[in-house]
Amino acid sequence: LVLKMTAQKFITSYNLSPTDAFKEAYRPYERLISPPEGSSVELHGTSAKEVSQALLNTKPFAKALSEMLGSSELVEGLLSEAAIDAMAGRLVLNAAGISIPIPSSSTSTSSSSTANTTATSAAEAPATAAAAAA
């Protein structure tokens, strides 16, 4: 069984405006930790402004997104510099690794007493992500 729910079907089925439907779909991302006020994230050496301009200037992409969302204003907001920067900041901050020692149990077959994981602080995450991508 394959379910296919387009934005337009969702809007029609639940009697929502495009803006309300977008807010519902975006809600999980709003739960992520926000970057500090005034901060900015570079994506592989590219600023959020450059990413925003490139996406908005790709007319077929912007048109398809507008048709899918049912609103050109939503597309402009979603692809704005502020929205790109906020989303990139949330993704970087929430993707940072955390080291959590896991004590071995008597039934464990592991010879190590703790699990070895990589720790990355939120401050190191952009540099680590950029180094990994290079």
Image (cartoon, rainbow, N blue to C red):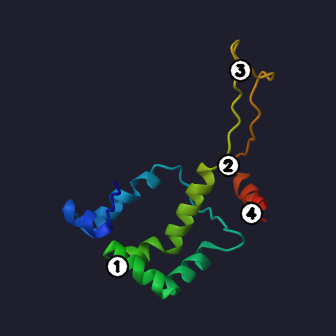
The spot of residue 99 in percent (x, y) is 71, 36
- The earlier-in-sequence mark between 3 and 4 is 3
Task: State if disc 1 and disc 2 touch (CB < 8 Å).
Answer: no
Task: State if disc 4 and disc 1 touch (CB < 8 Å).
Answer: no
- The earlier-in-sequence mark between 1 and 4 is 1
Outermost residue toward the right? 111
Label 1 neighbourhood size at 10 Å, few (<14), some (14-19), many (20+)?
Answer: some
Residue beneath disc 4 = 133
Q: Is residue 66 above or below residue 84?
A: below
Identify the amino acid type marked 1: Glu
The local secondary structure at tag 3 comes to loop
Identify the amino acid type marked 2: Ala
Outermost residue toward the top? 106
What residue is rendered at 70% in x and 58% in y?
126
Cα–Cα span, label 3 and label 1: 52 Å
The local secondary structure at tag 2 comes to loop
Looking at the image, residue 120 sits to the left or right of residue 84; the answer is right
The spot of residue 27 in percent (x, y) is 39, 54
Cα–Cα span, label 3 and label 2: 25 Å
Label drawn at residue 122? 2
Q: Nearer the viewer, mark 3 or mark 2?
A: 3
Task: State if disc 4 and disc 3 touch (CB < 8 Å).
Answer: no
The local secondary structure at tag 1 comes to helix
Residue beneath disc 1 = 67
Residue situated in front as seen by the camera: 1 or 34: 1
Q: How many marks?
A: 4
Residue situated in front as seen by the camera: 124 or 67: 67
Label drawn at residue 103? 3
User: In the figure, residue 24 lies in which quadrant?
Assistant: bottom left
Cα–Cα span, label 4 and label 2: 17 Å
Looking at the image, residue 76 sits to the left or right of residue 130; the answer is left
